[in-house]
Amino acid sequence: MPQQLDYHTIYEIFRRFREHEAEPKGELDHVNAYTLVVAVALSAQATDVGVNKATKELFKIADTPEKMIALGLDGLTEHIKTIGLFRQKAKNVMKLSQILVDDYQSIVPSSRAALESLPGVGRKTANVVLNMWFHQPTQAVDTHILRFGNRTGVAKGKDVVAVERAIEDHIPAEFQHHAHHWMILHGRYTCKARKPVCANCIIEDLCQYEEKTNV
Protein backbone atom coordinates (compact mmCIF):
# COMPACT_ATOMS: atom_id res chain seq x y z
CA MET A 1 0.00 0.00 0.00
CA PRO A 2 1.25 3.51 -0.81
CA GLN A 3 2.51 5.55 2.12
CA GLN A 4 1.56 9.16 2.80
CA LEU A 5 3.72 11.32 0.52
CA ASP A 6 6.04 13.93 1.95
CA TYR A 7 5.46 17.66 1.72
CA HIS A 8 7.90 18.32 -1.12
CA THR A 9 6.44 15.59 -3.34
CA ILE A 10 2.89 16.78 -2.76
CA TYR A 11 3.96 20.34 -3.47
CA GLU A 12 5.44 19.26 -6.82
CA ILE A 13 2.28 17.33 -7.72
CA PHE A 14 0.07 20.35 -7.22
CA ARG A 15 2.56 22.70 -8.80
CA ARG A 16 2.25 20.58 -11.95
CA PHE A 17 -1.53 20.55 -11.71
CA ARG A 18 -1.53 24.35 -11.44
CA GLU A 19 0.90 24.70 -14.32
CA HIS A 20 -1.31 22.44 -16.46
CA GLU A 21 -4.58 24.17 -15.53
CA ALA A 22 -4.32 27.22 -13.32
CA GLU A 23 -8.06 27.75 -12.82
CA PRO A 24 -9.84 24.37 -12.83
CA LYS A 25 -13.61 24.55 -12.95
CA GLY A 26 -16.36 22.29 -11.73
CA GLU A 27 -18.32 20.66 -14.52
CA LEU A 28 -21.85 21.19 -13.21
CA ASP A 29 -23.66 23.95 -15.08
CA HIS A 30 -25.24 26.68 -12.95
CA VAL A 31 -26.11 30.36 -13.16
CA ASN A 32 -26.14 31.39 -9.50
CA ALA A 33 -25.67 30.04 -5.98
CA TYR A 34 -29.16 28.56 -5.86
CA THR A 35 -28.83 26.60 -9.10
CA LEU A 36 -25.42 25.39 -7.95
CA VAL A 37 -26.97 23.96 -4.78
CA VAL A 38 -29.68 22.27 -6.83
CA ALA A 39 -27.23 20.90 -9.39
CA VAL A 40 -24.89 19.45 -6.78
CA ALA A 41 -27.79 17.94 -4.84
CA LEU A 42 -29.03 16.31 -8.06
CA SER A 43 -25.55 14.96 -8.87
CA ALA A 44 -25.48 12.39 -6.06
CA GLN A 45 -25.15 8.96 -7.70
CA ALA A 46 -25.40 10.61 -11.11
CA THR A 47 -22.97 11.98 -13.67
CA ASP A 48 -22.36 15.69 -14.20
CA VAL A 49 -23.18 15.20 -17.88
CA GLY A 50 -26.54 13.66 -17.01
CA VAL A 51 -27.37 16.41 -14.53
CA ASN A 52 -26.41 19.15 -16.98
CA LYS A 53 -28.66 17.62 -19.63
CA ALA A 54 -31.60 17.60 -17.22
CA THR A 55 -31.04 21.10 -15.85
CA LYS A 56 -30.39 22.83 -19.17
CA GLU A 57 -34.05 23.67 -19.66
CA LEU A 58 -34.96 23.57 -15.96
CA PHE A 59 -32.71 26.46 -15.00
CA LYS A 60 -34.11 28.60 -17.81
CA ILE A 61 -37.47 28.66 -16.05
CA ALA A 62 -36.55 27.96 -12.41
CA ASP A 63 -33.35 29.70 -11.35
CA THR A 64 -34.63 30.96 -7.98
CA PRO A 65 -36.35 29.23 -5.07
CA GLU A 66 -39.60 31.09 -5.80
CA LYS A 67 -39.65 29.99 -9.44
CA MET A 68 -38.89 26.40 -8.44
CA ILE A 69 -41.80 26.41 -5.98
CA ALA A 70 -44.04 27.87 -8.68
CA LEU A 71 -42.95 25.12 -11.08
CA GLY A 72 -44.19 22.56 -8.58
CA LEU A 73 -43.17 19.03 -7.73
CA ASP A 74 -44.67 17.48 -10.85
CA GLY A 75 -43.06 20.05 -13.11
CA LEU A 76 -39.65 19.56 -11.50
CA THR A 77 -39.99 15.77 -11.61
CA GLU A 78 -40.68 15.89 -15.33
CA HIS A 79 -37.43 17.82 -15.92
CA ILE A 80 -35.18 15.53 -13.86
CA LYS A 81 -36.73 12.11 -14.48
CA THR A 82 -33.63 10.95 -16.36
CA ILE A 83 -31.51 11.32 -13.18
CA GLY A 84 -31.14 8.51 -10.66
CA LEU A 85 -33.32 8.76 -7.55
CA PHE A 86 -35.20 11.61 -9.23
CA ARG A 87 -38.39 11.34 -7.17
CA GLN A 88 -36.64 11.79 -3.81
CA LYS A 89 -34.34 14.44 -5.23
CA ALA A 90 -37.32 16.39 -6.55
CA LYS A 91 -38.92 16.33 -3.09
CA ASN A 92 -35.67 17.52 -1.50
CA VAL A 93 -35.27 20.38 -3.99
CA MET A 94 -38.81 21.57 -3.33
CA LYS A 95 -38.29 21.39 0.43
CA LEU A 96 -34.93 23.18 0.39
CA SER A 97 -36.39 25.85 -1.90
CA GLN A 98 -39.19 26.52 0.58
CA ILE A 99 -36.72 26.69 3.47
CA LEU A 100 -34.56 29.18 1.59
CA VAL A 101 -37.62 31.38 1.00
CA ASP A 102 -38.96 31.08 4.55
CA ASP A 103 -35.74 31.20 6.58
CA TYR A 104 -33.05 32.81 4.42
CA GLN A 105 -34.84 35.44 2.34
CA SER A 106 -34.14 33.25 -0.71
CA ILE A 107 -30.39 33.70 -0.24
CA VAL A 108 -28.13 30.65 -0.15
CA PRO A 109 -26.29 30.68 3.20
CA SER A 110 -22.51 30.71 3.29
CA SER A 111 -22.00 28.43 6.31
CA ARG A 112 -21.53 24.67 6.16
CA ALA A 113 -23.91 24.06 9.05
CA ALA A 114 -26.71 26.04 7.42
CA LEU A 115 -26.17 24.37 4.07
CA GLU A 116 -26.11 20.88 5.62
CA SER A 117 -29.43 21.62 7.32
CA LEU A 118 -31.12 21.77 3.92
CA PRO A 119 -32.86 18.58 2.68
CA GLY A 120 -30.66 16.59 0.31
CA VAL A 121 -27.55 18.64 1.10
CA GLY A 122 -24.74 16.69 2.74
CA ARG A 123 -21.19 17.60 3.60
CA LYS A 124 -19.92 17.08 0.06
CA THR A 125 -22.63 19.27 -1.47
CA ALA A 126 -22.03 21.97 1.12
CA ASN A 127 -18.29 21.92 0.48
CA VAL A 128 -18.79 22.22 -3.28
CA VAL A 129 -21.01 25.27 -2.84
CA LEU A 130 -18.67 26.88 -0.29
CA ASN A 131 -15.71 26.34 -2.62
CA MET A 132 -17.20 27.21 -5.99
CA TRP A 133 -19.50 30.05 -5.01
CA PHE A 134 -18.08 31.46 -1.80
CA HIS A 135 -14.42 30.76 -2.66
CA GLN A 136 -13.65 28.96 0.59
CA PRO A 137 -10.82 26.37 0.57
CA THR A 138 -13.18 23.48 1.33
CA GLN A 139 -12.61 19.95 0.04
CA ALA A 140 -15.55 18.10 -1.51
CA VAL A 141 -14.33 14.50 -1.39
CA ASP A 142 -16.00 12.12 -3.83
CA THR A 143 -15.08 8.64 -5.08
CA HIS A 144 -12.52 10.10 -7.51
CA ILE A 145 -10.67 11.97 -4.76
CA LEU A 146 -10.93 9.04 -2.34
CA ARG A 147 -9.31 6.81 -4.96
CA PHE A 148 -6.72 9.37 -6.06
CA GLY A 149 -5.70 10.28 -2.52
CA ASN A 150 -5.11 6.70 -1.46
CA ARG A 151 -3.70 5.43 -4.73
CA THR A 152 -1.07 8.15 -5.04
CA GLY A 153 -0.35 8.70 -1.36
CA VAL A 154 -1.38 12.37 -1.54
CA ALA A 155 -4.18 12.07 1.01
CA LYS A 156 -4.73 8.71 2.65
CA GLY A 157 -7.84 7.75 4.58
CA LYS A 158 -10.46 5.03 4.92
CA ASP A 159 -13.44 7.31 4.31
CA VAL A 160 -14.30 10.71 2.88
CA VAL A 161 -13.94 12.56 6.18
CA ALA A 162 -10.48 11.09 6.80
CA VAL A 163 -9.37 11.98 3.27
CA GLU A 164 -10.80 15.48 3.64
CA ARG A 165 -8.73 15.96 6.79
CA ALA A 166 -5.65 14.50 5.10
CA ILE A 167 -6.03 17.00 2.27
CA GLU A 168 -6.27 19.87 4.73
CA ASP A 169 -3.28 18.57 6.68
CA HIS A 170 -0.92 17.65 3.84
CA ILE A 171 -1.64 19.82 0.80
CA PRO A 172 0.09 23.23 0.94
CA ALA A 173 -2.20 26.16 1.67
CA GLU A 174 -1.59 27.87 -1.67
CA PHE A 175 -3.21 24.92 -3.45
CA GLN A 176 -6.14 24.35 -1.09
CA HIS A 177 -8.71 26.40 -3.01
CA HIS A 178 -8.45 24.40 -6.23
CA ALA A 179 -7.20 21.12 -4.76
CA HIS A 180 -10.45 19.17 -4.97
CA HIS A 181 -11.09 20.26 -8.58
CA TRP A 182 -7.63 19.17 -9.68
CA MET A 183 -8.05 15.82 -7.97
CA ILE A 184 -11.58 15.19 -9.27
CA LEU A 185 -10.60 16.00 -12.85
CA HIS A 186 -7.46 13.90 -12.62
CA GLY A 187 -9.38 11.00 -11.13
CA ARG A 188 -12.16 11.29 -13.69
CA TYR A 189 -10.04 11.48 -16.83
CA THR A 190 -6.58 10.09 -16.00
CA CYS A 191 -6.45 8.17 -12.71
CA LYS A 192 -9.52 6.12 -13.60
CA ALA A 193 -10.83 3.38 -11.35
CA ARG A 194 -10.50 0.32 -13.58
CA LYS A 195 -7.64 1.29 -15.84
CA PRO A 196 -5.72 4.48 -15.09
CA VAL A 197 -4.14 6.20 -18.07
CA CYS A 198 -0.69 6.33 -16.50
CA ALA A 199 1.07 6.96 -19.82
CA ASN A 200 -0.66 10.35 -20.03
CA CYS A 201 -0.26 11.24 -16.36
CA ILE A 202 1.71 14.40 -15.56
CA ILE A 203 2.55 13.11 -12.07
CA GLU A 204 3.28 9.46 -12.94
CA ASP A 205 6.89 9.70 -11.71
CA LEU A 206 5.70 10.95 -8.31
CA CYS A 207 2.81 8.56 -7.83
CA GLN A 208 3.25 5.50 -5.59
CA TYR A 209 0.59 3.35 -7.28
CA GLU A 210 2.12 -0.07 -7.90
CA GLU A 211 -0.16 -1.29 -10.71
CA LYS A 212 0.57 1.41 -13.27
CA THR A 213 -0.56 0.85 -16.84
CA ASN A 214 1.03 1.63 -20.23
CA VAL A 215 4.13 3.18 -18.66
Image (cartoon, rainbow, N blue to C red):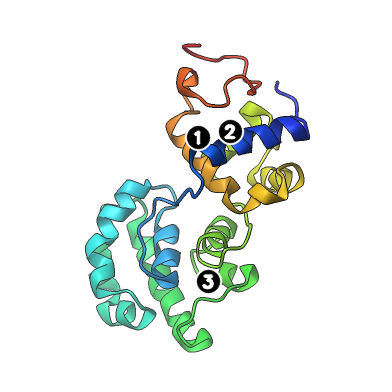
The amino acid type, in three-letter code, at marker 3 is Leu
Name the residue nearer the viewer: 103 or 63.
63
Q: Is residue 58 above or below residue 4?
A: below
- Verify CB contact (< 8 Å) between mark 1 and mark 2: yes
From the image, tell me which residue sits under label 3. 118
Q: Report how far apart the C-alphas of labels 1 and 2 lie in the structure.
A: 6 Å
Q: Is residue 97 above or below residue 127?
A: below
From the image, tell me which residue sits under label 2. 148
From the image, tell me which residue sits under label 1. 187
Please provide percent x and percent y for residue 209.
Answer: 62, 20
Q: Which of the 4 image quadrants contains residue 136?
A: bottom right
Q: Is residue 141 above or below residue 31?
A: above
Please provide percent x and percent y for residue 4.
Answer: 75, 30
Determine if residue 102 is in view.
Answer: yes
Answer few, some or many: residues within 10 Å of disc 1's Cα (few below 14, many 20 plus, some between 14 and 19). many
Q: Residue at x 68, y 50 (%)?
A: 174
